[in-house]
Amino acid sequence: MSDEYIVLKEISKKFAGGVVALDKVTISIRTGEVLALLGENGAGKSTLVKILYGLYSADEGSIYINGRRVDISNPSEAIRHGIVMVSQHPQLIDALSVAENLALGLRTFSVLTSIKRISNFILEKSREFGVRVDPWEKAWRLTYTQKQLVEMLRAMLLNARVILLDEALTYLPLEEKKKFYKFIKEFAEKGGSAVIITHKIPEALHVADRIAILRRGKLVGIIEGGRARIEDVRKMMFGESAVEITYERLPASQPRERSVIETQDLWVTGDFGEDAVRGVNLRVREGEVVGIAGIVGNGQRELTQALIGLRKVSRGRIFIGEIDVTNRGVHVVREMGVGYIPDSPLAFGISIDNSMAENIAALYQRKSMLIDWSKIREMASSLIEAYKIMIPDANSLIKVLSGGNIMKAVVSKEINYCKIALIAHNPTRALDEVSAAMVRKSIKERAINDGVAVLMVSEDLDEIYQVSDSIYVMNSGKLYGPFPPDEAERSKVEHLMVI
Amino acid sequence: MRFIVVRRTRSHPYIRPLVIVLSLLTGMMLVAILLTLIGAHPLATIVAIAYSFITPQVVKDMVLLTMLGCALLISFKGALWNVGAEGQLYTAIIPIVWITLYVAPWSASSPPYQSILVTLASITAAAIFGAMWGAIAGVLRAYVGIDEVPVTLIMNYIAYYLVNLLILGPFRGRYVYGYIRTDDLPDAYKLNINVVMQRTGNAFIDGFLEFIRVIVYYAYWVLAAILVALLTWIVFNHTSIGLKIKILGSNPEFLKAVGVDVRRTIVMALTLSGLLVGIASATYYLGDLTRLTYPIQAQTAGYGYLAILVAWLSMLELQLIPISAYIVSSLRNAGRNMQIFGLGGLESTLILLGSILLTYSTLRFLTEYEVRVVK
Amino acid sequence: MSLEHYIVNSIIELAPVFATFYLVALGHSLFEKAGLLDLAIDGVFFMSSSIAVGVAVASGSPVIGTIVAAISAMLLGAALAFLMTSLPISHGAIGLSMMFLGYGIGIIVGYPARLEVGSIAMYAYGESEAMAIMAVSIAIGVFVHIILKYTKLGAAIRACGENPHAAASLGVNVLLIRLIAGAAGFAIMGAGSSFFTLAWQKFWDPKSYTLGYGWLAFTAALTSGRHPIVLMPISLVFGGLIFYRVKIGVMYGVEKDVANLVPFIAALAAMLIFYSTKLKKALAPPASLGKIYYREERTI
């Protein structure tokens, strides 16, 4: 029987806007175990782990390590207690080298130690752990997988006793993911503990000793890993509304012949000079929903940004409504009635310091000299009602809304705006299953009823299968497909995502 | 026990006026401490400051700073820190001097309507020149990417020296002896209304009458201030460019994503800001300054810099600009009254301004965040 | 005069000018490398140069003047670094407020000294010390460069400037590192400012707060990418433009105010060149410079 190494007692946390993230959650982490934290979006899993790592502060509750109460106010202190977190976004500083990044947390070296000496130390240690890393390489040159590898190496160098993985492995290719899971299991066998946050139930069942499920900030239950079944876990995660969630395919649309979105041999450069999109040929017809599946970081973001005009194209052409819009700017594309749901909604999708009305006016009345506020307020009201956005009124600032409602505000305005095409990248991010299902339905309806050509990029393969008339896979900047969803073998598609 | 800073989950109804009052109090305390260190009497200092809030001298600065505050609001709301109001102010005066002294000098035989024409022409020209000076910074920021703060600041110095050259050269006063400065503005072009008040002997009534006299004296300024404030209100509440500027200040990426030309918006914001500074500058010259003395950087009252404090103190809200202008003008007044070295209150004004801006900039976070004690 | 003599003479003449500009720009760069925007530079420049005068006159020694100027600036730098890192406040606003305060404090510290003695030439550094000052400045610059580029401390400072949140996640005590960079940076600025009045001008005037030399140092730091070594030739150029402006004026028969314009127009031109060429990428400012350091707790 393993000891309880860390105990989180009655942890509560509320965010701005009144959102309850955690409600008196009590949970323990045992020595030598792998604990999985499951729950839908907004259940509180990430918040809990961030409190343990000192990134957030709990409103109520306490943390005990080995029976002693501790106060963790920043990551440095967490590291001192042997707790290291790896998140899905590598926390490496791009402008610094790998060694410089790792050196920052190594207490054994004094401040005036030369980087050269530390680099040699890292080289030695990485060989010991069987990991191939170049300490002199600048962080911005590494691939996503390499960065996550460096993060794991960092945990080892910091003598971690507890490793927190906040969706850290979710976006890794399957082969790499397996290696990491093996590594975690070995780590646990040697006496360490691991907390894994994932939303992939099968993976959790596979690797965890215990599974804890959170729903709406409350701990719903803890199951032993060996005895859990997918259906039981699903029910605990979603509660009653599990009935409404369906991953069944929505009725297919009847695409017409005319091409609305078309690219010819498209090449787009990424932020670091690499070729993020390589020779993509794509065609979305009137009324068609084209889904692009793929793991994050394979060029999808650069592709969607190039299509809307936010990013320059280095080679090839883009046609919208049969007009060449290559490198002509966002305004040309928007002019034609193209909606855009970006992957970073807080950056390109909405302005949180402004009101719902102002955000709508920015898009819909950007060409007029004076703004017709009554028309805008009408539109805002109808959108708020249709999408059940929990907002006091159209003049409330977006920043008081919870994450899911902010997303709804982004999505509703764009789905309503589009006339001929919609470019959607992860349109159901941060939405609960019920809202996500509703958004997918809305998108599909616009395609079927109004002939909008929809290009949907999503990291959720289930979502792609549910909505698309035609599936492509994006891998390393190249597009594979099209695959008709009712015929294409799922495993083949998944395989293309990870080769 | 430690302190942590967290965002407020609900906003406190009176937090904004509370923060302003707190900033004023702590700022004044800071000043009192600094001045005590060099021998001034702290109580006398505080009394002098308090008294300055209610003298009629406050009126003039308040009206002018209201105009300038609105002008800066236009760019500040877009997160464009136009610290170049000084340069824009003096650049805008250049065409006025030219028009009023050389293009259409007043003489005994000038037709009566000439003064109106000249006044209008001056204000228009000032607005254009101010807009131009602002536009340069806007273009450099929008199309080259240079931060507007160092640019506008350096352009202040460039403006000073350019004006100096003009004072020494083509604008050199012909009817002046002893000083190097421009000729006086002809009385016909001055924007003042002079009334003489009878002294009643009663201190309160006389004080009140003095207030009235000053307000009437600057009546044109009050009109202009109302106009400028109205214009600003219309821009931000009814025009597309106003909304774009607001979003530029909160999330320029979103502005890009909806297809707005962000660069053009930046240039417009700084140009409009300079334009309004120009209008304020015209009223200032025609109603008070009436001449430029060499070297200008040593003679300036620094309204361009005072306006920065006004705009900041107002939390970028138009309704608070007049209040903020009142506070800053009282402080400037206090600085003048608190002269330590006979330098015209220069050092006191600077210290007052700096202290209040410092405490305010520090305490401002309390409007959106709160401090919690964690055991 | 032979060419060598001319060059040697120029260097001796320029030594205090160089030391002033270089150290002020260097200290400013160190402060900003940690991610802290420094808009107080002109105020700190005037304040420290005035404190140096006041203390030098009171104590009779310019060295004590420099030391006190450096220490007072150091305390200020640490205080600013503390405020700007612990609280979610605007770096720009704090900086500009400090600028005004610096002007005011400078006047009340410097004026009594000036009233008392009139000329401060007696309390200033001598000619022979000018070369020593320049050598010390260069040594400080090289030292700062080595620390920044080759040590763990330097990596930590740069990390705070590039991405303080990631730095914190990696285990850096952001507050402590910024306190160090803030204190050290401002101390160097204070020392450099003292050389303005005590080694270069040997003169103090209350209205000299309108000179704007701090902003020229700001531009020098910006166009050299805040790099301690690249900053050396650039400081020399800016310093030379200012120092020789009078000579240039006389040579070309040009008004004093035109000569005054030259360094500022040069500064504008320098920024233009910097931002429109590849220099911008190579000498880029720290990615998180001026950004409010507050760990935003969001659910999306």
Image (cartoon, coloured by chain):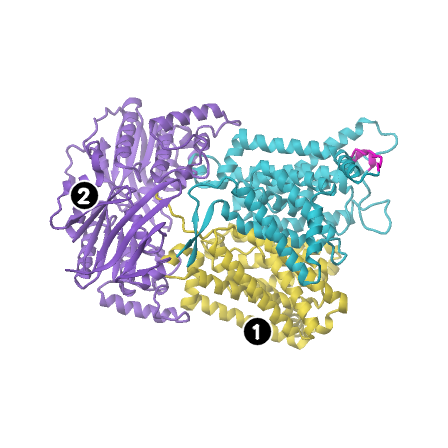
Q: Are marks 2 and 1 on the same chain?
A: no
Locate residue B173: give its quadrant: top right
Dot 2 alpha-carbon crowd within 10 angstroms: few under 14, some 14 to 19, many 20 or more = some
- Say whether residue C221 is visible: yes
Depth check, front residue: A259 or C74: C74
In the rendered picture, chain B carries what hue?
cyan
The three-letter code of the residue at mark 2 reads Glu
Q: How many marks?
A: 2
Q: Secondary structure at mark 2?
A: helix
Relative depth, front residue between A349 and A433:
A433
- What residue is shown at x 32% (from left), y 44% (from top)? A21
SS of the residue at dot 1? helix
Would you name the residue on which mark 1 appears? C136
Which stretch appears magenta? B186-200
Farthest residue to the right: give it. B108
Chain C on-screen colour? yellow
Packing grade of label 1 (10 A; few <14, some 14-19, many >=20) is few
The answer to whether B178 is drawn above or below residue A334 in the figure is below
